Amino acid sequence: MKVKRRSSFLEAWIRLRKNKLAIVCLAVVCLLILIAVFADLITPYENAIANNSAAKFAKPSAEHWFGCDNLGRDMFARVIHGSRVSLLLGFGATAVATVAASLLGSAAAFIGGKFDTVVMRLADILSSIPPILLSLAIAAGFGRGLPQLVISIAIGSLPGYVRIVRSTVLGISGQEYIEAARSMGFGTGKIIVSEILPNALSTILVQATMMVSANILSGTMLSFLGLGVPVPRPEWGAIMSDGLDYIRYASHLVIFPTIFIAITALSINILGDGLRDAFDPRLKGKA
Amino acid sequence: MFKYIIKRILIMIPMLLVVTFIVFSLISMSDVDPGRSKLGPEASQELVDELNHKYGMDQPFLIRYFKWVWGAIRLDFGDSWYYDHPVSVDIAARFPNTIKLTLLSIGIALIIGIPLGVLAAVKQYSWADRVFTTLSMLMAAIPTFCIATIGVLIFCWKLHWVPATGVVNGWKSWILPSLTLGISYSASFLRFTRSSVLDTIRQDYIRTVRSKGVRERTVIWGHSFRNSLLPLITITGMMLGGLLGGAVIMESVFVIPGLGTLVMNSINQYDMPMTMAAITMLAAMYMLIMLVVDILYAVVDPRIRARYTSFKKKKAPAKAEGGAA
C-alpha cells in the first residue's frame, strides 16, 4: 500500500515538473509565502502603519518603491505586510475547510443512509445563504478579527467542497480494496482515515489549491465590505478598497495591491490546473 | 414530475426554518443591547428596558425565535427596529432590484461564456482559445469590486456613457453593474463550457455523427453541446450563491438599493426583524432558482425525466440529489 501510494505521488511530481508554466507558478507561490513569512526582514512593520503627512500620496520613488497612501504610509511596506494576512486567510481558511470537508464528505459517502442525507441537506441549507452574508452574520455574532474571518470564509466554501469530496469517495468506496479492508475487520473510522482519504487525496489536493485563491479573493471582498481585519493592520483587499477612493489621482494606490492579488490568484490557479493534469493525465488540456 | 415539484417546494419549508434559525442564533450571540444602541448612551435605563421589552429582548432566545417564525408564517415580519416601520415596505422596494441584477448578470454571463467556451473547445489550442482562456483566468484573479470601480472610472467619469450609481436612470443604470458582474462570472462559465465540451467532443458517438456526414454546426451544437449541458446546469446552480454574493458587492459599489446592502446595513444597525426578513427572502429566492435548475435537468436529460415519471409507480427511486449528483 505504502509503496504504491508514494509512487503515484512521485509520478505526478515527475509529470508536473515537465509543465514549465506550473513550475514557474509553484516558484511564485513559494516566493510569496517566503515574503509573507519574512516580511519583517524585508521592511519593518512600523513603516506599514506609521502615518507621515509629508509623504501623502507620494508617487513611487527610490525611497518609497510603491509610493505612499492617503495617510502617507509606505505602500511597499503595506503590500508586503498585507501578504501576511491575505495569505493566512487564503491558506488558513482552506486548511480548516479541507479538514472539515474531508471528514464530513467521506463519512457521508461511506456511512451513507440517514447521516448522508443530513450532511447533504445541511450543505444545501448552508449554500442557500450567500457566503458573504453568512460571513456578515458570523461577524455580527462573534465579533471581528482574524480567527472569525478564517472560520467564516471556511464555512462559506464548505458546502461545495463537501459535495466534491463526497462524490469522489462514493467512487472509491465501491472499489475492491475497501471491501478487502472491511473483510480484514477494519472499523469505519480506520477505513476512512487509512484507505479512503489517501486515495481521495489527489482530488482533495487539487480542489484545495484552487480554493486558496478563491478564499484570498473572498477575504478581499469582505475587507471591501468593511468586515476585514481591524485597521490599521494591512491586508490586500483593505489596501485596495482604501485606494479605490483615490483612484482618479493616485492610481498607484490600487495598481500595486491589485498586481499582487492577481499574481497570487493566477499562479495558484495555474498551479492547480497543472496539479490536476499531473494527477490525471487523461484530463490534460481540457480545463 | 408535478408531484416532485410539490415535494421540493415542501422541503423548502424545513430548510428555510434551519437557515433562519442559524442566522437568528448567530445574530443573537452578539452582546449588543438593541434598546441601548437605539436610544444612545444617555438614555435612562428605564426607557432602554421598556424598548427592549417592546422588542421582546427580555424573553429567552427560543421564545423570541418561535415568535418570529409565527409572525413569518403569517407573512408578518414585524417592524424595523431602526426605522420603526414595517420591514415589508423595504423588502418590497428592494427585492425587485436584487432579482433584476442577479438575473441580468447571470443572463449576460451565460450569453458571453457559453458561445466563447464552445468556440475555445472546438478550436482548441488556436489563438482564440489561448486569448479567451488567458483572459478568463485573469478575470477570475481580480476582485470584482476592483473591476467594477475601474469600469465606473472609464465609462462614467471619462466617457460619460452611463450613470455611475443608483437606479433612477432607468435601464441605463443597470448596464454597468450587470455587465461587470456578468462578465466576471462569464469567465467561469467559459472555462466550464470549454472543459465539458472537450469532454464530449472526443466521444465515439460524435465520431459516428460526423461519419454520417452531419453538418459540423449540428455536430457541435446539436450533439456535443447538448450532451455537455448537464454539467453546465449544475455549475450554474452552484455559482448562484456566489453570484448573489457578487450582487451584494455590486449593490454597494453602484449604490443600488437591493437586499444585499439591506442585510449589510441592518446587521450593522442590529436591526433584527429587517435582517431576518431580508435573509429569508434571499434564501427563498436561491432555493426557488435551484428548483428551476433541477427541473431544467429533467428537460435537458431524458434519462432523468424518465426517472421522475416512473416516480409514481416505484416508491421514491430517485431523490433530489440523485439527479444532481
Image (cartoon, coloured by chain):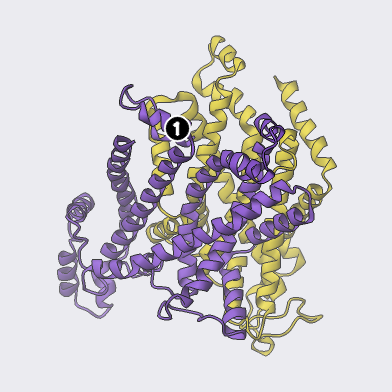
Q: Residue at x 70, y 71 (%)?
A: A256
User: Is residue A244 at all visible to an observer of this figure?
Assistant: yes
A1 up-or-down from B85: above or below: above
Question: Residue A106 at what x, y percent from top left?
Answer: 52, 30
Question: Residue B210 at what x, y percent from top left?
Answer: 70, 35
B207 up-or-down from B41: above or below: above
Which residue is identified by label 1? B304
Question: Residue B132 at what x, y percent from top left?
Answer: 70, 57
Left or right: A212, with B123 as reference point: left
Chain B painted colour: purple
Q: Residue at x 81, y 47 (%)?
A: A23
Left or right: A115, with B197 as reference point: left
Q: Residue at x 62, y 54 (%)?
A: B115
B232 up-or-down from B163: above or below: above
Where does the N terminus of chain B fall, quadrant-wise?
top left
Question: Residue B262 at what x, y percent from top left?
Answer: 36, 68
User: Is residue B188 at all visible to an observer of this figure?
Assistant: no
Front position in the image: B9 or B91: B9
Is the residue marked by circle 1 packed among few (<14), some (14-19), or many (20+) residues within 10 Å? some
Total labels drawn: 1
Q: Quadrant of residue A38?
A: bottom right
Chain A painted colour: yellow
Q: Chain of mark 1?
A: B
Front position in the image: B72 or B83: B72
Secondary-structure class at tag 1: helix
A214 up-or-down from B81: above or below: above
Under mark 1, the amino acid is Ile
